[in-house]
Image (tube, rainbow, N blue to C red):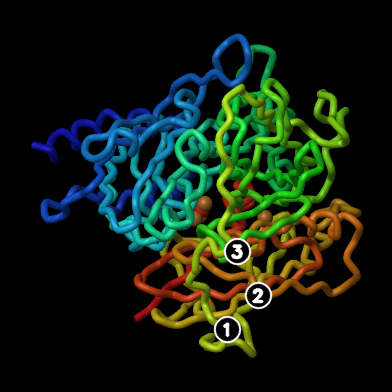
Amino acid sequence: MIHRRQFLLSLGAAGILAGSRRSALAAAMDHGLPAAEATPGFDPHVELSLRAEPGTAAMLDGAPTAVWRYSGSVLKGPADALGFLDGAGHIPVIRVRRGQRLRVHFDNALPEASIVHWHGLNIVQRMDGHPMYAIDPGQRHVYEFEVGNRAGSYWFHPHPHERTSWQVYQGMTGMLLISDEEEEAAQLPAGEQDLALVIQDRSFDGGNQLVYLNNVRHNWMMGFAGERVLVNGRADYRREVARGAHRVRLFNGSNATLYHLRWSNGAPFTVIGTDGGLLARPVEQPALTLGVGERADVWVDFSGLEAGASVQLLAESWTPSLQHFTSEQLGLPLVDGARLIASFVATAQQIPVQALPAQLSTPPLPVLEQAVNASAPRRIEISMMMGSPRLNGRSFGAMDEVHDSDRVKLGTTEVWEFVNEGGMGMGMGMGGMMQMAHPMHVHNVSFRVLSRTRSAAASATHQHLATGFTDHGLKDVVLVLPGERVQVLMAFENHAGLYLYHCHILEHEDLGMMRNYLVET
Ligand code: C2O
Ligand code: CU
Ligand code: CU
């Protein structure tokens, strides 16, 4: 019966798809694969329905904004397994524990193909949301997996080839928060004192509707930059906080913009976690530089504020070509040279502050001595020759194409070196255009940042941004600045299969700055 229903739904969808803007190639590629269905032997602890669909969101004061969004409900498990950030709004947050089996019925009610990628998870290929698994409108893909990652702030987003940037921009982003015993032992601020902030920039027309890049290749190369910064889907984000310690999970969910964050009162950030969960020990730093996809968990004590007083999170925002946004470009005043991202306003409620433990966790960092290629790292050269963003001279090709240099062995540990030293090329026909910063992401693994090297002296901009790098702990995105070579170390454990690595500037990813890699047994 299920088969019959899906069949009818896909017939209805065919008409919508005919009018969609997807390339014929992308359409042809994902049709060969049947959508994954629920397996009877899999007994989930948490079962969710998740639907991608058009809707509206209250992003600005006044008229609602038309968006594409995830909605859903809990079919089995604790009621808070699926919620929405700040209780309302359009950004879902899934909460699971390490070791739980999760089943998600993903329904595509968009007018074009989509698929969900669980960013940061170590997971079998079939559940990773590779674009080859994109499902058509009206179809369902059932995800089933055991949550193996350690506690941390992960996220999910669409990954259909050439449409990721558009779909995320329309509103499709979710957080996936994993907890575990190790995290509980650290006794961090929880419940109302555990906040997640998704930072995204957008442009609006006079009627509060989203405006995206027009279809000019140069705009795509530069990446989208918006005048307004939204936090959790809201402009002018303001949040009441008790006067006590909080855990604030910061996440850059923008398409291309990178942020250099600081507190308005000049306090340093106390970083307790990054992409892959808690650090061994807290790290203090004056600023936080977050490229697209990067997360930083910070601990902050609001107990010194008077009731009614506030502290602001400020950000300089930079385009991938490292142009700092000015007030004129933004049409909004800057505060002390930066944009106002969020205000935290103290309530009268006082909460006793529990000191942060000196040892937060024991992250399972890969060990350099175990690398099979420490003396000759796997080199990934980033280039933008001839107006085409490439990795090792190649763009994303056929869905399952793997180059010989992109094969790794299951059970091995490797050093990868992202090289961003040139390759803008004359072919752009745009003399004087700068090289770009690229946040590089690898699916299916968490890595450790080993080193950053520069071929020439660092510019003032570079030195400035470097004060906020979050290269600690386990990462799955690393920002690679122009002129830089960044080495990362990762272990390919648990799953053989086909995965991706790519620039997480969504426009670059969609232009093909993405490659498959194969984990072989
Ligand atoms: Cu956020 Cu291909 O990933
Ligand atoms: Cu990913
Ligand atoms: Cu890029």
Find out whether the residues at labels 3 and 1 contact each other: C-beta distance under 8 Å.
Answer: no
Residue at image position (84%, 74%) is 455
Q: Which residue is mark 2?
A: 450
Residue 346 visible, this angle = yes
Disc 1 residue type? Leu
In the picture shown, does residue 57 fall above or below 422?
A: above
Residue 297 screen position, x and y as percent: 58, 50
Find out whether the residues at labels 2 and 1 contact each other: C-beta distance under 8 Å.
Answer: yes
Q: Nearer the viewer, residue 66 or 145?
A: 145
In the picture shown, does residue 230 fall above or below 98?
A: above
Q: Quadrant of the N terminus?
A: top left
Residue at image position (13%, 38%) is 2
Q: Secondary structure at mark 1?
A: helix
Q: CA distance from mark 3 to mark 1?
A: 20 Å
Labels 3 and 2: the sequence-earlier one = 3
Q: Which residue is mark 3?
A: 281
Binning the other alpha carbons within 10 Å of mark 1 as few (below 14), some (14 to 19) or many (20 upward) gives some
Binning the other alpha carbons within 10 Å of mark 3 as few (below 14), some (14 to 19) or many (20 upward) gives some
Looking at the image, residue 437 sits to the left or right of residue 65; the answer is right
Q: Which mark is residue 216?
A: none
Labels 3 and 1: the sequence-earlier one = 3
Residue 217 screen position, x and y as percent: 69, 44
Q: Which residue is mark 1?
A: 368
Residue at image position (55%, 56%) is 275
In the picture shown, does residue 355 fall above or below 454?
A: above
Disc 3 residue type? Arg
Question: Which quarter of the figure has residue 518?
Answer: bottom left
Q: Secondary structure at mark 2?
A: strand
